Image: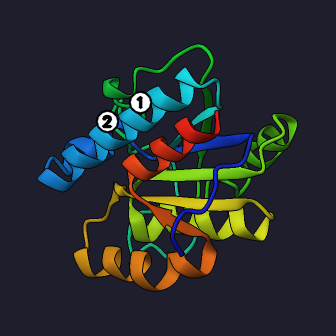
Amino acid sequence: MALTTIDPTSALVVIDLQKGIVSARADHPVTAVVRQATHLAAEFRRHGLPVVLVNVTGGAPGRTEAGWSGSSAALPTGWADLIDELDVQPTDHLITKRRRSAFHDTGLDTLLRDLGVTQIVLAGIATSSGVESTARSASDHGYHVVLATDAMSDPDADAHRHSIERVFPKLGETATTAEVIDMVEATR
């Protein structure tokens, strides 16, 4: 579904744009994602809307043959630091997650409710993992979900396309960064 509105109290939530992940994926789509996500963050700040920056420091314990999980002990120094391009500001809210969803075992829902947020705009990496899991949780928590599709990327192009074309329309509205910013401008 296309973007129809920006709620008076919406927040930008940026997933996993951190040094260890971004540097491992220094391809063109990631460069564009960083550019779009930083543009969104700057515009949300300019309009006095909350910006939530999420990093990941661990994974769910359990079966490990399907990918990275468990302990953060093996992470290199600085791996979980947010990328410099995000230009973290004192007004930003920082959330550290240890699972795919930024809502699982974090204070994100409480933070958003305390701020009066009813809508979240999502951006980040990886589309089919952290972004999709957070979108699903946001929908389950009753937030109006907007997915800035040109401000996200996935190492698997088919998984990225599946999330955007098949999953996200069931969870909320999709839009480009420009469409989100235009709507913010029109409603602020």
Indicate which disc residue 81 carries.
1
**Which amino acid type is marked by label 2?**
Lys
View extreme (front): residue:
186
User: Quick one: SS at disc 1?
Assistant: loop
* Residue ID at (60%, 62%): 4
Q: Can residue 134 be seen in this view?
A: no
**Taking 126 as reference, is 63 above or below it?**
below
**Which amino acid type is marked by label 1?**
Asp
Q: Residues within 10 Å of mark 1 (few under 14, many from 20)?
A: some
* Residue ID at (71%, 48%): 7
Q: Do the residues labelled 2 and 1 touch (CB within 8 Å)?
A: yes
Q: Can residue 63 be seen in this view?
A: yes
Residue 101 appears left or right of 116: left
* Residue ID at (77%, 42%): 112
Q: Quadrant of residue 68?
A: bottom left
Residue 45 vs residue 155, the one in the foreground:
45
* Marks 2 and 1, how far apart at CA: 6 Å
Question: Residue tagged by mark 2?
Answer: 19
Residue 169 appears left or right of 24: right
Q: State which tag comes first along the sequence, 2 or 1.
A: 2
- Residue 119: x and y in percent read 70, 52
**Taking 178 as reference, is 84 above or below it?**
above
Indicate which disc residue 180 carries.
none
Q: Which corner quadrant holds the C terminus?
A: top right
